Image (cartoon, helix red, strand yellow):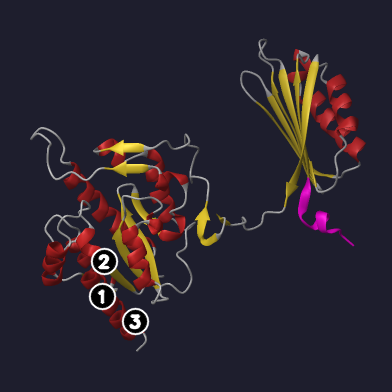
């Protein structure tokens, strides 16, 4: 009977690098094929098939398919290299003490080194959550390694199209990301000056509303892209302040607000398209003005066949603007009591429609 460790382990892999090898050996398919057979004999594994290829102008690869996995030798006979590698993978244990001296002697190598790796069974990665707040997911940046984020503050294209932000956007619209199960009402809402978003005063007010509607999935519309609420604790999303600008650029310069609107419209369309089978409705908490993205959301709603709702309405918004005069944040009207009350009524109506 297999032990628990054996059940979780696919086998052992030994990788050997040999330098200063004899040139006549590195260029000989016959000798190298014999070395592979000697290795398999020493390890007591069964060869099922063997193939060899000679490269031009030099170099040889020999690969044996084993009942247990494979064994391969690859050579680089260039005078300045005179190197070979040996890769052995079996479902059992591989003793390097047996193999390394054998291949070192056979290839006449002046030096060698090796690594031994246990190859684990592929399993679903463990989701790491923020300590004390299991609703928030912590993850390494997708699709590459990026420098650790430093606090970024500025305006313009270089901030709106940061490589790591684009990497996250690609992840959120890929098959690798799945919105939370049971949350089929997409709510788009603005980000906040304070980070993490959920711990700002405005978003805290919003959460008092959304916590009453179990089917709502909040996705934050930010300068760095669309951020599903559960990923907001990742360092990249907590270390920026891309300042709001209402003007101040010359006619020759790119208007950062126009660029933001265009990018946001595209990002909303791409996100909804990627998760059309998950969501049944799309709701926007946003400014009902010309420089907003109401039109983009309306178009996406129509094209995707999703139930659509936007808050606040124009008359409510005008009253909220008056109510929030003196607030420094341009998004303040969206988080007044009257705006959020209208949002809550709209969410209730959407849920009622979906439950029919």
Tell me the quadrant of the picture where the N terminus can be found. bottom right
Residue 351 disc label: 3
Marks 1 & 3, CB-CB < 8 Å contact: no
Distance between the Cα atoms at labels 1 and 3?
A: 15 Å
Residue 70 disc label: none
Q: Residues within 10 Å of mark 1 (few under 14, many from 20)?
A: some
Identified at 81% across, 54% down, the residue is: 5
Distance between the Cα atoms at labels 2 and 3?
A: 15 Å
Q: Residue furthest left?
A: 251
Where residue 259 sits, quadrant-wise, is top left
- Please name whichever residue, 351 or 56, is drawn nearer the observer in this view of the structure: 351
Disc 1 designates what residue? Answer: 341
Marks 1 & 2, CB-CB < 8 Å contact: no
What kind of element bears circle 3?
A: helix
Q: Is residue 37 left or right of residue 130?
A: right
First in sequence, mark 1 or 2: give its number.
2
First in sequence, mark 2 or 3: give its number.
2
Disc 2 designates what residue? Answer: 284
Q: Is residue 77 visible?
A: yes
Identified at 89% across, 39% down, the residue is: 43
Q: Decide: is 66 above or below 86.
A: below
Query: In the rendered structure, does residue 5 fall within the stretch colored magenta?
Result: yes
Q: Residues within 10 Å of mark 2 (few under 14, many from 20)?
A: many
First in sequence, mark 1 or 3: give its number.
1
Percent position of residue 123, x then y: 66, 57
Q: Residue furthest front?
A: 326
Q: Decide: is 104 above or below 156.
A: above
What kind of element bears circle 1?
A: helix
Percent position of residue 319, x then y: 12, 68
Please give the range of residues in magenta: 1-11
Identified at 87% across, 20% down, the residue is: 105
Q: Decide: is 14 above or below 123.
A: above
């Amino acid at each position: 009977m297999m032990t628990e460790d054996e059940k979780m382990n696919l086998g052992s892999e030994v990788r050997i690098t040999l330098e200063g090898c004899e040139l006549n050996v590195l260029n000989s398919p016959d000798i190298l094929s014999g070395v592979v057979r000697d290795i398999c004999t020493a390890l007591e594994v069964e060869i099922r098939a063997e193939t060899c290829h000679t490269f031009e102008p030099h170099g040889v690869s020999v690969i044996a398919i084993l009942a247990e996995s494979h064994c391969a030798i690859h050579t680089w006979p260039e005078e300045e290299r005179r190197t070979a590698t040996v890769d052995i993978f079996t479902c059992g244990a591989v003793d390097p003490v047996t193999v390394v001296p054998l291949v070192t002697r056979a290839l006449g190598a002046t030096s060698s080194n090796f690594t031994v790796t246990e190859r684990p069974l592929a399993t679903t990665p463990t989701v790491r959550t923020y300590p004390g707040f299991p609703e928030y997911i912590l993850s390494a940046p997708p699709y590459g390694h990026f420098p650790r984020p430093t606090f970024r503050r500025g305006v313009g294209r270089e901030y709106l199209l940061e490589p790591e932000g684009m990497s996250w956007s690609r992840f959120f619209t890929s098959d690798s990301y799945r919105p939370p199960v049971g949350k089929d009402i997409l709510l788009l809402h603005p980000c906040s000056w304070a980070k993490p978003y959920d711990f700002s005063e405005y978003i805290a007010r919003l959460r008092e509303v959304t916590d009453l509607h179990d089917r709502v999935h909040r996705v934050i519309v930010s300068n760095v892209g669309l951020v599903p609420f559960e990923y907001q604790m990742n360092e990249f999303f907590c270390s920026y302040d891309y300042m709001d600008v209402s003007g101040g650029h010359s006619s020759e310069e790119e208007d950062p607000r126009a660029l933001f609107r265009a990018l946001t419209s595209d990002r909303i369309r791409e996100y909804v398209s990627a998760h059309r089978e998950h969501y049944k409705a799309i709701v926007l908490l946003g400014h009902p003005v010309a420089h907003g993205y109401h039109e983009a959301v309306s178009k996406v709603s129509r094209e995707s066949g999703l139930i659509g709702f936007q808050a606040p309405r124009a008359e409510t918004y005008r009253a909220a603007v008056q109510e929030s005069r003196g607030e420094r944040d341009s998004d303040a009207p969206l988080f007044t009591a009257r705006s959020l009350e209208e949002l809550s009524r709209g969410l209730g109506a959407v849920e009622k429609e979906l439950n029919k």
